[in-house]
Image (tube, rainbow, N blue to C red):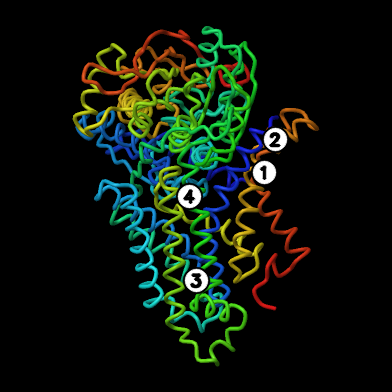
Amino acid sequence: MSWVLILEQLLNGLQFGLMLFLLAAGLTLVFGIMDMINLAHGSLYMLGAFLAAALVQATGSFALGVLLAVPATALAGMLIEVSVLRTLYARDHLSQVLATFALILILNEAVRIVWGTDLPLPMPAALSGPVQLLPGMVYPAYRLLIIGVGAAVAGLLYLLVARTRIGMLVRAGASNREMALAMGVDIRLLFTLLFGVGAGLCAVAGALLGPLLAVQVGMGENILILAFVVVVIGGIGSIRGALAGAVLVGLVDTIGRAFLPLLFGLFFQPRVASAAGPAIASVLAYLLMVAVLYFRPRGLFPARG
Amino acid sequence: MKKPLLALALVVISAVAIPSLAADKVKIGFISTLSGPSAALGVDIRDAFMLAVKLNGGKLGGLPAEVLIGDDQFKPDVGRQLAEKDVKLDKVNFLTGFVFSNIMLASVPVAFENKVIYVSPNAAPSPLAGKQCNPYFFVASWPNDAYHEAAGQHATDKGYKSVYMIAPNYQAGKDSLEGFKRFYKGRVVGEVYTQLGQLDYSAELAQVRAAGPEAMYIFLPGGMGINFIKQFVAAGLSKDIQLITPGFSSDQDIIRAVGDPMLGTFDAAHWALDLDNAANRKFVAAFEQEYRRLPTVYASQGYDTALLIDSAVRGVKGRIEDTEGVRKALKAAKFQSVRGSFKFNRNQYPIQNYYLRVVGKDAQGRLVNKTIGTIFKDRGDAYVQDCPMR
C-alpha cells in the first residue's frame, strides 16, 4: 500500500464529502432555523440535475447549462416553499414528514412526465481524462473540478453566513428563533430566501454529480439519507458542523470501502472477508453517527447553546 | 373419515372425466425491471418479447396471447407482490420477465407453489441449477456463471498473468466471479464486491490502479457497468489494463452510453448480432426496424423466451391447463433459437455454445460486437450433477 493510493483515496473521500456538504448545508439550515423536516430536499437535488441536463442540451455548453440550472432550481425551491411548505411550519414533525414525503412522490412523477425516467448529461470532453497531479499520481480531471467547485461554494457560504447581514439573521434564527422573531426579523422572507439558497446548493451538487453518476428519477432518495446523517453528526442548524460532518462521512465511507475488505483479509478467511468487508463498509457512516451521538448527543458543533 | 375420502374421489373423477379442452387464450405474466438505472435491460427483454408476439400475429402457439406487463422497480418486494397478483388473481399460464436474480428468487416461489411455469429470459442462479432445481423453472438464457466461465477461459487462453475482478455483493455477483475463477489459471490480484446499485467507483478504481493488473474483469450489469467503464476510462486506466467483460457489459446499451472508449473490449456471450442463421437474421432486422436500435443479448433472450413458449403451447395443441404436458413440450425446445443450437439439460438449463466477441466498427461505422471465435461448444453448467430431477 503506497502513499499515492492513500492520497488518492483521501481526494475521493473529500470529493464525496464536499458534495454531501452541498446537500446537507441547505438541509441543516431548514431543519435548524425553521424546525422543519424536509424529506423532499433530495427531490430538489434531482430537479437540479434534470434542469442541468436539459439546459446543457439546450445551450450546448456544460458551464452555461449548469450556471443556469442553479438559479432555476433556487426559484423552483422558493416556489415550493411559498406554495406548500409555508403552511407546514406550525405543524408537528409527523405532518411535515408525511407532507414532504408526498412531495417526493409528486416531484418524481412530475419529472417523469416532463423528461422521462432519465436524461443523458455528458462530461465535458476537456475534463473526461486523467491529469498528472504529482509524479506517479494521476487523478480524473472532472473529480478535481468537483473538489474545486465544492470547496469554493463552501467558502462562499461561510462568508455569506459569517460576514453578511443576511448571514447574521440566519445565525440569530438558528441559535434562538423566538428571540429573533421578537427582535423584528422578517422571518417569512428569510425562510423563503434560505430555502432558495438550499435548493441552489442542491442543484450545484446534482449538476456536478450528474455526469459521474446518472441523472434519473429517484436519485435524491439514497443520498438524502446520508445527508441527514451528516446533519445529525454535525449538529442541527450548524453550517460548520455540516462541513465537518460531510467531509468526515465522505472520508469514512470511501476509506471504509477501500481498505476495510483488505483489513478483514488479514484476520479472516478470504470468503468471510469478501462478504463481511463490503457489508460493514456500507454501514460505517451510520456507525460513525451512533458513536458521535453517544459522546456528543447534540452533534459536533451544536448551533444552539 | 369416509366423507372426505368420497369427496376427494369425486373431485378426482370429475377432473379426469372432464375432457381437457384447448384454452381460448394464453395469459402471460411479464414482470421486469422497467424503471431506474437498470431499466434498459428489462425494456429490451420486453420489447423483443412483444416483437416475437407481434410477428406471430398476436398469438403464441396458435392462441391469442395476453401479456400482463409489470415493473418491479428493481425492488424484490415489488416483484414479489406483482408475482402474487399475476399468479393468484390473474391466474396466468406462464410467468416470465425478471432481469435480476435477487428479485426473481424473491418472486418465483409463488409460481412454483401454484404450479405455474416460470420461463427465465435472463436470471439463472446456480442454486436453481443444482440441489434446488425445480420442475417449474426453465431457463431460456444462460446459467448465471456461463459468460464468466467463458471469459475466464479466454483470459487463460490469452495468457494474462494477473486479473482484478469486481462484482456487486449479491448472489449473481458471487456466481460470476466463481465462474471466472473456475477457468482462469492466472493470478487473481483483487476480488472486490461492491454494493448492488453503486454508481460511483472512485475508491475501487484507486485500488485497481495500485494493484496494477494486466487485465480487469467486471460483472456490473446495467447502469453500474456504464458508470464503471466511463470512470475507468476517465481515470486513465484503460491504457494499461485490458478490460474483459461478460457479453452484456459491452453490449449495445452500454456501447450507446459509453461510446468510443469501448473499442477493443473483449467479451464472452452465447449470442451476437452477426451470428449467421436464418432466425437471427430475421430477428435483428425486425428488431431494428421496429425499435430503431440494435438488439442486445437481453433482447435476444426475450425473443427466444417468446419463441420457446410458442413452441410449448403448440406442442400441447393449446391445452395449456395440462402443466405436465406443457413441461414436456418446453423440454423438447422445438424452436429455432436466434443463438443457433439450443437444448435443455436435465436441470432445465440450456446446453449451448459461447463465443468470443470484440467491440469494433461495422460497415456503417457503428460500434458493434463482432464474433471472433468459439470459446465453448455445447456447454451445460457446473451444477447439473446435484440436481435430483431426471
Residue located beneath label 4 in the image:
B78
Q: Chain of mark 2?
A: A
The residue lying at 62 percent from left, 27 percent from top is B210
The residues bearing labels 1 and 4 have C-alpha atoms spaced at a distance of 27 Å
Name the front one of labels 1 and 4: 1
Q: Position of residue B332 (x, y in %)?
A: 40, 17
Q: Which amino acid type corresponds to the residue marked 1 in the rendered image?
A: Ala
The residues bearing labels 3 and 4 have C-alpha atoms spaced at a distance of 22 Å
Q: Residues within 10 Å of mark 3 (few under 14, many from 20)?
A: few
Q: Earlier in the sequence, mark 2 or mark 1?
A: 2
Q: Is residue B46 left or right of residue B81?
A: left
Q: Residues within 10 Å of mark 4 (few under 14, many from 20)?
A: some
Disc 2 vs disc 1: Cβ atoms closer than 8 Å?
yes
Disc sitting over residue A281 in the figure = 1
Q: Chain of mark 3?
A: A
Can I make out residue A22 in this image?
A: yes
The residues bearing labels 2 and 1 have C-alpha atoms spaced at a distance of 8 Å
The residues bearing labels 3 and 1 have C-alpha atoms spaced at a distance of 31 Å
Instruction: From the viewer's side, name the closer residue of A301 and B221.
Output: A301
The residues bearing labels 2 and 3 have C-alpha atoms spaced at a distance of 39 Å
Q: Position of residue B388 (x, y in %)?
A: 61, 21
Q: Residues within 10 Å of mark 2 (few under 14, many from 20)?
A: many
Q: Tag 4, which secondary structure?
A: helix
Q: Tag 3, which secondary structure?
A: helix
